[in-house]
Structures are given as structure tokens and as C-alpha cells.
Amino acid sequence: MKRTLLIVALLVATTLSAVADKGMWLPSLIGSRIKDMKSKGFKLSAEDIYSINQASLKDAVVLFDGGCTGEIVTEKGLLLTNHHCGYDAIQALSTVEHDYLTDGFWAMNHAEELYCPGLKVHILQRMEDVTERVNAGETREDIIAKAEAEGVGFKAKVESMYYGNIFYLFVYREFSDVRLVGAPPTTIGKFGADNDNWIWPRHTGDFSVFRIYADKDNNPAEYSADNRPYTPKRHFEISTAGIKEGDFTMIYGFPGNTQEYITSDAVKYIAETSDPTKIALRTARLDIIGAAQSASPEVRIQYAAKQANIANAWKKWQGEVLGINRLGTYDKKLAYEARFREENPTKAYLLDSLAAAYERNIEGYFNYELFNETLRGIELQQAVAIALSDKLSEEDKVARAELFYKDFQVDVDRALAVAMLTEYEKMGTYISEELKALFARHGGAKEYATWLYDNTALGTLEGYRAADVANDPMAEFARAIAPIAQRVKPYTYRNLSNIPDIERWFRPYVKALMEWDTKRAFFPDANLTLRVAYGKIAGYEYADGEYHLPQTTIEGIMEKDNPEIYDYNIPQRLRDVYATKDYGRWGVTMNGKYTVPVCFIATNHTTGGNSGSPVLNGKGELIGINFDRTWLSTMSDIEFDETLCRNIICDIRYVLFVIDKVGGAEWLIQEMGL
Ligand code: ARG
Ligand code: GLU
């Protein structure tokens, strides 16, 4: 109890002096930031952001598909998120005949909305500090079980904040009947693709539209044709009034993972070992997948979502290393630690203990990361897992296998296996005796991989159906890597620093930092729980003498348009609209030109998981959908730099323009009350 109070008191105290836009704040404690927010242009109260007594903005924010954010914009459960967040669902519904990725999809009424199997959204009911209960010995499982018994579809989680100094209970409602309502063609939704990803200036219409369905009592329910649109407690109002540099912006969503308080050792590991290794491994995988995709339209669709996932972090890590080096984060951390030692001699041992803990765990964590990036990426082992599972019913196995083979090409997987096993042989120090024996028997990793794919019968769905899976060479491979999976399991944490043997030293260290560095604004690191970040719309100096304006327009799309390049080949419909300047009510005059706004940037502190988050103005109205950060600012997960860190937002006016003028789905605009 005392400890919680002390930390909360410290939090409130530190915030008074904080002026930076950095930080991702817990909504239930946002009261401590309100003064600062108001001074920057926020017009509402803390209760408007988060309340358990009345409907508040938090009731309109959803955790989308377990890793993104979405926002409810009508009283009929209409949901906006990013195109890349809906991508898996859109891809799963696509075939060569109905290619919703390439052509887009627009339901013209409720009956045409498409159920997305497996897609779930979570809406937060409440959050609660349970530190006392945890410290009194109540288990997380008990706390969760009690909370889940409170209502239909309740799902609970207990999350630690500040490395186990505080614990919070989050109670959600889980909705599993979610339907696709609309998606622009990929050449709008993923315009510029990997080339433009993590880059400003940007012209991507990265949005898609879904709807939450509920049973007749408005409760979460499995899919049923009888379900009806969910009536939310609250939905966002949309503002089309426009924005300008300097305006207040706030973002409300589910950031996944930051490492603000790590020590120099962890920074060194990230910048010198982890990121470079993962980047190189992914370059190899992307080369293989990319070559197969350019050779076949079928493979292009099958591997689209896989490719996008691999490429995304691959590019982000490159920006991160660049940023860490540019900012000198490692040296800054060293200097900070030296100052801490000097001013807290009795606590200096904490840093020594942390360093020793890193030393003990770094090899294990590296092997865990390596396992994920190499062995786990060999997909055909999934066929074995499905066939031999003792948890799945026969019916489920049939369905899973069909789903797996729908997006699988054995030649691609063979090439990946050859490359990844070769790399694993070079770097893996947690290799199993079984895998070693297989390498030895065939004369090396490469030779073994070739033999494996020459001899497995599981390469196709037909082969799989006829095969004796338990005696297939792929099953032998799965058995050989199982001990490696077991060995790296103790290192399976969000970050290196969350490994319990390290985190137990972080707990007193971060607490000591809070007591010592009272000028610093201590927000809890992101952990996929609901947060508020705020800042302003702002351009930035990208390089010496090169200022980047905060807003892009349709003119930039036309400049990039190129029918020869898949990722820049915009739909003809968009060209036609541009040619006639038929912008309807979405047209604006900017700098003397009649145009349509497309994207903008702001200083909100965001990270992965904030994709799809509502970006709000000072009145709490929706002005855009967050979808990215600029490349030079991806190191904000470790160090946030005001001068360079910008999040990238799709302007809500462009979203509406595309729905209306490209999709022809005027009924959705009406539903949004515009
Ligand atoms: N970079 C954004 C985020 O981290 C968008 C990713 C989707 N786009 C892509 N080309 N893969 O997730
Ligand atoms: N695109 C990211 C996501 O999927 C958000 C960008 C970021 O990492 O800031 O959450």
C-alpha cells in the first residue's frame, strides 16, 4: 500500500515540471497530466477521457486483433482501423477470383458485410490498481478469474507497470463477431508499400472499416446471422474542420512495447547484436519471398501478409540502430548511470547487479531471438503440429490444414529452410543433440535441409492428407528442434529486461530513479495496455536546411503515381477524380491550391500497437488514424527525441474522401452523421 502511494505521489510530483511531449500515460491517472494538456490546448476533462461512472472516450477505443487499435465512429459499432491492421483478415477473405487486397472491398449494406473468422476486438471496461492484492499474495489467476466472472464476454489481464512496482487489472469485453465493411485497394491502403513504410512525406490511405456485432442483448457472442450491430456506450465524433501546425493532438490506443528505462548494457545489445542479426536474417528471407512473389501472382497474394510482417520490423530496426547511434543513446545512458552512482552511492550496487544479470541472460535471450528468426520461420513444421496435436478435434485439424496450405508454397519454404538452417548452424549455441545429429548425418545444415524437402510428403495439401505424418521426415525435424524451443522458453519475454532474473533488479532500480530524478516524467513502459499520449501537429527539420511540412496532399500521390510500379500504381478511379477535381465536400484550398489533404505528422509518443489509434483534437474529435512513425524516430521506443520524433497519421478527410469517391460507399458517410 505504502509503496503504491509513494510511487503514485512521485508520479504526480514529477509531472508538474514536465513539459516534453514524451510519454504514454495510463488513462485512469490522466488527472495528473490534465494541467499540462490544458496548457497545450486540450479542452475536455480527465473524466471525459476515462471514467467508470459514465460513458467516456475510452468506451470508443478498441484493441483490434490483439495487436492494433481501432475506434468506434457510429452508434452502430462501425469501426475504423488501419489497412495494415485489417490486412490479415482482408487477405484471408481474398482469392485470385475475389482479390480484395488488389481491388478493395465495399459492402453496400449490412448483408454484404463479411464475417472475419478469428478476428477479435476488446473493449476496456475498467482498469484498477491491484498492487495491494498482489503484494498480499493473491495470485494473478485468482484476480483474473474473479474479474471474468463479473459479466458476459469478460476477459481480464493483470499487467505490471514500472518493472513490477505496480500492478494493474484490466477488464475487457471480447467481441468475436467482427465483419469487414470496407477496404481501399492496396494501392491506396498500402500505397508506396515497403518503400514508403516508416517514411515521411507519406501518401498512404492506411485505413479499413469493420463493424462489431453483438447478440440481441448487445452482449458479445460467437458469429451468428442473427447478431446485430453493437451499440457502443460512446463513439467518436469526427471533425472535418481541418488542422494546422501547432494544434493540440492526443492519441488514445494500445502501444505495445517500449524500453525507456533500460541501462547501457541493453542498448548495446540492441544496437550491436540483436537488431543487426535480425536485420540480416530478414534480408535473406525477404529476398527469397520477394523473388517468388514477382514470379507468380498467386504467390504474391499467398505471401503478402507474411512478407509485410517480416519487412515491417526489418525496416524499423534499421531506423532504430541509426537513431540510437545518431543520438548517442549508449553514451548518454553511461553518463546517466555514472551520475546515479555518484549521487546514490548506497544504491550503486543495483547497477552492478543489473549488469551481472544481463551477463547471465544475454546468451539465452539471443538464442531465443535467433530461434524465432530462423527455425520458427520454417513453416512446414506447422503441418506436423496440426496433424499431431492432441488439443485439436479432427474437424479443427481439417480446417486448420486447409487454411495453412491455402497460403503455402513448398518451394518457397524449402529455400527459406535452406537459408535459415544454414544461419542457425553458424550462430545457434543452444542447438539440440538431435538437430546436430541430423546435420551430421547429411553432411551439414544445407545438405540436411535439401534432403528434408526432397523427402517430406507434406509439401502439398494432397500429400499431407495421404501422408503418415508421424513418420514423415518433417516430424523428425519438429522433434529435433523441440528441445531448442524448450531451452529458449525461459527467455520468452517482451524484452530482454523483462526476464525475471533481470527485472527483479529493475524493480528497485526504477524506484530509485523515481526518487532521485524528480525532474523526469516517469510513464510506465508500453505493454499493450490502453494509454494516452499528447502533443502537437508539427513539421521537423529532417536534415540541415531541409524542413518537412506536417501535411501532405493528393498532389503528392499524383507525383508518385506510376502504372509501371505495382506499389505506386493507383486505381484509375483516383486518377479520374483527380483529373476532374471532383473532390466534393472533401476538397480544400491549401497554399492557394484546391486539393485533398492526405496525411499529417505530430509529436505524439507512439509505438507498434498504436496503429489504427484515434488521433483527436483538443475537443476530443477524431481528426485522423495513426499508422506509422518517421524512420529517423523509431528509436523513440528507447529514447524519445522531441526534435525528430513524429508519428504519421492518415487525415480523416482523406479516409472519408476515399470511402465516398473511390469506394462509392456514401451510406457509411451518412451513418457517420456527416
Ligand atoms: N510501419 C507501420 C507499422 O509499424 C506500417 C506497417 C504496414 N506497412 C507495410 N508496408 N508493411 O506497423
Ligand atoms: N505501424 C505501427 C503499428 O502497427 C505503428 C507505427 C509505430 O510503430 O509507431 O502499430
Image (cartoon, helix red, strand yellow):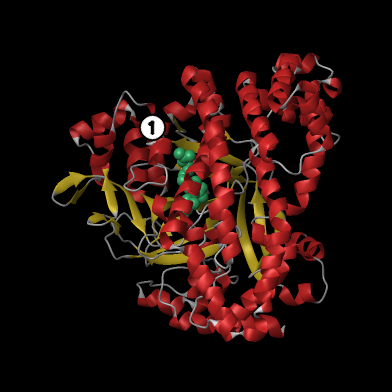
Residue 114: where, in percent of width, then height?
A: 56, 33
Q: How many marks?
A: 1
Which residue occupies the foreground of this view, 603 or 500?
A: 500
Residue 204: where, in percent of width, then height?
A: 37, 41
At horizontal 56% and vertical 58% (from top left) the residue drawn is 268
Q: Pointer 1: residues within 10 angstroms few (<14), some, or many (20+)? A: many
At horizontal 58% and vertical 50% (from top left) the residue drawn is 273
- State whether residue 517 is above or below residue 467: below
Numbered disc 1: secondary structure: helix
- State whether residue 463 is above or below residue 259: above
Q: Residue furthest left?
A: 592
In screen coordinates, is 502 left or right of 657?
A: right
In screen coordinates, is 387 left or right of 594?
A: right
Residue 221: where, in percent of width, then height?
A: 68, 45
In the rendered image, the quadrant that contains the N terminus is: bottom right
Badge 1 is on which residue?
187
Q: Is residue 490 visible?
A: yes
Q: Which picture quadrant has residue 580?
A: top left
Which residue occupies the foreground of this view, 304 or 417?
A: 417
- State whether residue 282 is above or below residue 468: below
Which residue occupies the foreground of this view, 134 or 443?
A: 443
Which residue occupies the foreground of this view, 467 or 25?
A: 467
- State whether residue 495 is above or below residue 39: above
Q: Amino acid at mark 1?
A: Thr
